[in-house]
Amino acid sequence: MSALFEPITLRGITVPNRVWMAPMCMYSAAPEGPETGVATDFHFAHLTARAAGGTGLVMTEATAVAPEGRISPGDLGLWNDRQQQALARIAASISAHGAVPAIQLAHAGRKASSERPWNGSTGIPADGGGWQSLGPTGEAFGDHPEPAELTTEGIRRIVRAFAEAAERALAAGFQAVELHGAHGYLIHSFLSPQSNTRTDEYGGSFENRLRFPLEVVAAVRAVWPAELPLLFRTSATDWLSENAEDGRTGWTGEDTVRLAKELAEAGVDLLDVSTGGLVPDAKVPAAPGFQVPFAQRVREATGLPVGAVGLITEAEQAERIVADGRADVVLLGRELLRNPYWANAAAEQLGAAGRWPTPYGYAVTRR
Ligand SMILES: Cc1cc2nc3c(=O)[nH]c(=O)nc-3n(C[C@H](O)[C@H](O)[C@H](O)COP(=O)(O)O)c2cc1C
């Protein structure tokens, strides 16, 4: 019996297994014109392939809720009908291949208007073909151009944009929404004391720094049906306070436990636990499964279902994480880029049933 290939039910949705696809930006949509932020045939093939490969839940890349919330000019968006139509075709294809279609909704905040990673991820100034980014304060991320500090009205507009994108996601056929609260993007930048030094009701105390993220959760939960799960991705640490050699104060694993309790009360059904991304020069001790203990801590302290992510590459490693109760699901990123059929290969290795497309299944299950 494989724990990894046991179904998991969140609200009214049963995901057929616990191998989930992590959100991964492809930076491959049109940067301007009527197709801006619209998923292409490449996105269709990319996401369909992982569903056909037996993955339990297939998540889109960070999809911006507003034009200025894109990380790069090539990011997907979900603020107009054209974008919604293209994503609907993808959600239908993921479902048709037996996986649960999920979408990550995001606002890049002060890390927006960046070059694609293969061009260096540097900030593009507004007068150099980019756009004005937005942040909790006017302080820049690394050597990116300075963001404009969000006004209260600006915050309200973005909260509404998240809710409107969630309504579009529902209409497009997605069955789970994940809010991107990690990696230094807008929601995370409000949470961390390292980036949020506002002096109004959205900054300062722990409660104030949670205000904007919880407003986004409430606005999305209000439009997202009660029978469908809402996920939240968090960076459990900025890797500052945990590092004895780094004197800076950041968001910590303990803060994450407190946040998880608030999120659970606000109607979040699973916390997807990543780390880092807020401070460019923070030292990250990356190693196989290095983020799993943060997920485990949340699970043990709160009982909220959690996802573990980061350098999970082997079937037996993934099986142990779930079987030992350290996380409820695992999310795979780069390993699924390398091998879209990872889940079916893992099922075979663990003696569980995979999920092949019918035209493949009768053939590949005999030699
Ligand atoms: C190409 C690429 C794009 C990514 N884009 C996103 C994204 O859109 N949203 C997000 O939350 N994380 C993103 N990530 C992080 C992954 O979701 C994942 O957390 C990370 O790659 C660690 O998992 P892995 O070791 O299995 O790749 C991205 C990672 C990669 C490699």
Image (cartoon, grey):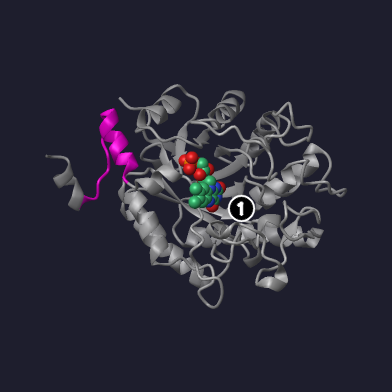
Magenta range: 341-358
Residue at image location 30% in from the left, 50% down from the top: 52
- Ligand 1 within 8 Å, label 1 CB: no
Residue 196 can be seen in this image: yes
Q: Give the structural element (helix, strand or loop) at label 1.
A: helix
Q: Residue furthest top?
A: 324
Q: Residue 73 placed where, x, y %?
A: 58, 66
**Is 16 a magenta residue?**
no
Question: Is residue 23 in sight in this rendering?
Answer: no
Q: Tell me: 154 left or right of 259.
A: right
Residue 287 point in image, percent of width and height? 52, 31
The residue that mark 1 highlights is 220
As shown in the figure, which amino acid type bears the numbered disc 1? Val
Question: How crowded is the residue under tag 1: few (<14 C-alpha within 10 Å), some, or many (20+)?
Answer: many
Where residue 225 sits: x, y (%)?
Answer: 53, 51
Q: Is residue 20 above or below residue 60?
A: above
Quadrant of the rendered structure where residue 258 is? top right
The quarter of the displayed image where residue 127 is located: bottom right
Picture quadrant where residue 240 is located: top right
Q: Residue at x 88, y 48 (%)?
A: 199
Q: Position of residue 307 (x, y in %)?
A: 51, 36
Is residue 355 positioned above or below 128 on the image?
A: above
